[in-house]
Amino acid sequence: MNAVVKPAVPQIRPMRSDDLREVMAIEVRAYDFPWTEAVFRDCLKAGYSLWVLESTAGILGYGVLSAAAGEAHILNLCVAPEHQGAGYGRRLLSRLIDLARWHQVERVFLEVRPSNTAAISLYHRSGFCEIGHRPNYYPAANGRREDAVVMARELLPD
């Protein structure tokens, strides 16, 4: 029997390729311009750190981290819209920062839409600072583009 027991209290575990159906269902609900399943598969193949937060309700959110050359980059951090505001984003972010430390990186970078004020607030509370902008970085409605706020957090030795 191959029964998968889902935890009652949300737990963070590595993402598997068989999670992608649930992950994509969240991705398309959360973003107007979602990643494709192929992007997630490429991240898995590349050996990036992909994690899901799972409970008896299924996958509640996920995060993707790339680490190399003394730096880490949070590529995607998402909580299902119906579960936002419960601290799950903070838990996932904390896990990604812990992984960056494990990789012995000195700083963690990310980009976020200026319109995503909830995420920017989370990142500020978690020690990230705005270090710049990337003009016309994200696709937006009506064929337009939206800038990205570039944020970073230094990881000091314990």
Image (cartoon, rainbow, N blue to C red):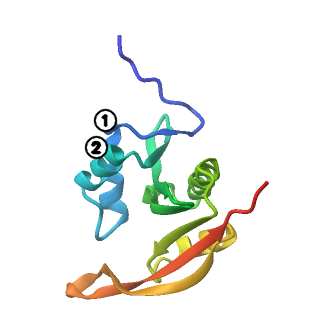
Quadrant placement of the C terminus:
bottom right
> Is residue 22 in view?
no
Name the residue at 47% across, 39% down.
14
Question: Is the residue marked by circle 2 packed among few (<14), some (14-19), or many (20+) residues within 10 Å?
Answer: few
Q: Position of residue 128 (x, y in %)?
A: 64, 72
Q: Secondary structure at mark 1?
A: helix
Answer above or below: position of 135 versus 67. below
Marks 1 & 2, CB-CB < 8 Å contact: yes
Q: Position of residue 40 (x, y in %)?
A: 31, 51
Q: Kindly identify which residue carries mark 1.
A: 18
Q: Position of residue 22 (x, y in %)?
A: 33, 44
Name the residue at 62% across, 47% down.
102
Relative to 135, 111 lies left or right: right
Q: Amino acid at mark 1?
A: Asp
Relative to 74, 97 lies left or right: right
> Is residue 81 in view?
yes
Q: Secondary structure at mark 2?
A: helix
Q: Position of residue 111 (x, y in %)?
A: 47, 74
Name the residue at 64% across, 50% down.
98
- Residue extending furthest right? 158
Q: Nearer the viewer, residue 3 or 12?
A: 12
Answer above or below: position of 53 versus 7. below
Relative to 106, 140 lies left or right: left
Q: Nearer the viewer, mark 1 or mark 2?
A: 1
Q: Kindly identify which residue carries mark 2.
A: 21
In space, the residues marked 1 and 2 are separated at their CA atoms by 7 Å
**Residue 71 circle label:** none
- Residue extending furthest top? 1
